[in-house]
Amino acid sequence: MAYLADESNKNCSNTAATNKELLTKLERVTGALKTLSAGNHILLRASDEQELLYDMCQVIVKKGGYRIAGVAYAQHDKNRTLQWMASIGVDKEFLETLHFTWADTEIEMGRSAAATAIRTGQPCVGRHILTDPIYTAPAYAPLRENAIRLDYAAITAFPLHVNGEVLGTLVMGAIEPDAFDEEEVKLLSELADDLAYGISNLRIRIKHQAAEATIARLAYYDPLTELPNRTFMLERLQDAIDTANQHHHALAILYLNIGHLRGINQILGYHSGDQLLQQLAQRLTSNLKESDFLARAGESEFALLLPSGGADYSIQVAQRLDAVLRNSVKVAGLMIDPRVSIGIALYPGHAGEAETLLRRANAATNNLCPARGGYALYAGGQEQECTRRLSLMGDLRQAIERNELLLYCQPKVDIASRRVCGAEALVRWQHPVHGMLATMEFIKLAENAGLITPLTHWMLDAVFSQSHAWYKAGLERALSVNLSAHDLYDPLLIDRVQGLFSTWGVSPELIQFELTESALMEEPLMALEALTKLKKLGIRLFIDDFGTGYSNLSYLQKLPVDSIKIDQSFVMPIVENNDSAVIVRSTIELGHNLDMEVVAEGVDSQAVWDLLATLECDVAQGYLMSMPMPAEQFNSWESEWEGRLTKENHSVLGTCD
């Protein structure tokens, strides 16, 4: 009987020990789960990387019950040091004094759990800091003393994988020597992976915010002079006109035209011309009131808004600026006389709308001799201009109805292969009296006359007809069409496009639509709906003049677009202007990161082409390949282009031989 009692007591003791072990294990897993859950909440709220690391360490200690926690990043310096970014439970300053390294070395601190996790990319689990042979080395004595003082015995380090590389390690210490069993490590590994994702996501977000800020600034500022650009000026001028109208006072706009800039660019180079513009911008800025608003309005032009004051005051300002700007400017070692002509237009006497007022201030400079400069008030011509415009509106309506417009095409060339990959369709108008009219002039006429929809219908008909003709000739050549904001928000647009596909039997891959940022931002929700419907038809969509309009990157990411076209104002000067090169490079990288094709407009020289090729831009469009040409000449041009490529290839082969 005594024997049975002893056996019974022994079994009870074993059961109690087993239960205690299971309870301890359960507590550890529960602690790991709490840590994982709290860590996920931290990730959702994180807005700063350093704050994220600190908060995660705090969660591990406060919520998970671990004794210490720290995050170290691997430095790729000569000694492969570990930089401690955050720690809880142990002083970061103390850790820095130990000179941790992740180098594979037997001496110093290269065999620690943190170093091993970084080198192997795998968790280094459950090292007993007081008994593990690695930690008996003299270099680890301060660490062992610290462990005894802070009462932690087991150390585990988890690698932080970011973008396919080990960024660093998440280290934590527990009181129990046998801590970090398999289930616990599995949960904590998930926590480390979540932290790594959070770090990566924050960095991507910061890059996107920086790119968004850059693009937003490009929309309203000139990168060369850092002055507001024409777009910003027009908005500010219209606001000033509205204010002047409410308070019944006058305002003035001064248009400053630099007469010698073109010659300086041609003789001394664009860099010298840029220096001249920058120095004049600084000189103007230092001679203005706080209420005055100065902008770069064109290649060789500045515009100055005087928000209050009539003719007398604006003339006084013009005289003062004329005197200031007559002083020579040192450029390329030479003293250059800039010779600035100043035109003045007044509200309400000369115009009541911003663009018209700015244009008339510019027109006033035509009354001045570029070689002498000076200033002049806008004088008359309103009635004659209005009569001419009304006449042209009627002629344009007739030209659309009689199919008298012309379809032009400008080729797009794949930079890598140098093969033609499509063309942009453009409309031209050969007026029987005035000759070939500027496109922007008759587009503006169409807008004012309510002819945008008929003009778009003509363009769509012409493009589908041309695409069908090319297809019948065995040429599968994509043709892109520009759509305005008015077109995009036309409720009948989708039906008309579907009808044209049915009529001509053209493949959707051969038709593309280009839309400007400004058009997309007028009514973002309507634009998204319209683009989604167009995309469902299988049409490729482009954002045109990218960088010249104000758009939000988070909104752009939602749009079902395939390509972005960098505006020529950024592309053309990239060889001479480092700022433009940086902008173009950033836009290309941004487009590729968003899985978009990138097209560069305004490729007018071999040097620009070569730089774009180096930057891995996808497609080029510009005068280097060809000016816009009548559609019927495109086949001949392409044959010549292909012939040039063949000759160049033969030349290269001959050289190799």
Image (tube, grey):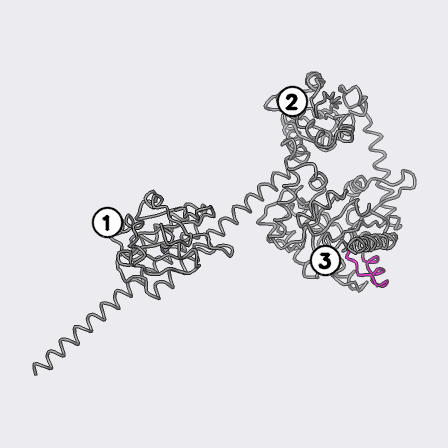
Residue 33 horizontal side relative to residue 492, left or right: left
Q: Residue at x 76, y 59 (%)?
A: 510
Q: Earlier in the sequence, mark 3 or mark 1?
A: 1
Q: Secondary structure at mark 3?
A: helix
Q: Nearer the viewer, mark 3 or mark 2?
A: 2
Q: Secondary structure at mark 2?
A: helix
Q: Check residue 331 in the rendering and tell me which mark sits there, or answer none.
A: none
Q: Earlier in the sequence, mark 3 or mark 2?
A: 2
Q: Check residue 494 in the rendering and tell me which mark sits there, or answer none.
A: 3
Q: Crowdedness of circle 2 by 10 Å Cα count: few (<14), some, many (20+)? A: some
For badge 2, the amino acid type reads Arg
Q: Crowdedness of circle 1 by 10 Å Cα count: few (<14), some, many (20+)? A: few
Q: Depth check: 403 or 145 in front?
A: 145
Q: Quadrant of the C terminus?
A: bottom right
* Horizontal and vertical percent position of residue 185: 36, 62
Q: Depth check: 57 or 208 in front?
A: 57
Q: Are marks 3 and 2 in contact (CB under 8 Å)?
A: no
**Residue tagged by mark 1?**
149
Residue 10 horizontal side relative to residue 131, left or right: left
* Horizontal and vertical percent position of residue 450: 78, 44
Marks 3/1: CA–CA distance = 74 Å
For badge 1, the amino acid type reads Arg
Q: Is residue 314 magenta?
A: no
Q: Quadrant of the N terminus?
A: bottom left
**Residue tagged by mark 2?**
283
Q: Are marks 3 and 1 in contact (CB under 8 Å)?
A: no
Q: Which residues are magenta?
A: 464-479
Q: Is residue 469 magenta?
A: yes
Residue 413 horizontal side relative to residue 397, left or right: left
Q: Crowdedness of circle 3 by 10 Å Cα count: few (<14), some, many (20+)? A: some
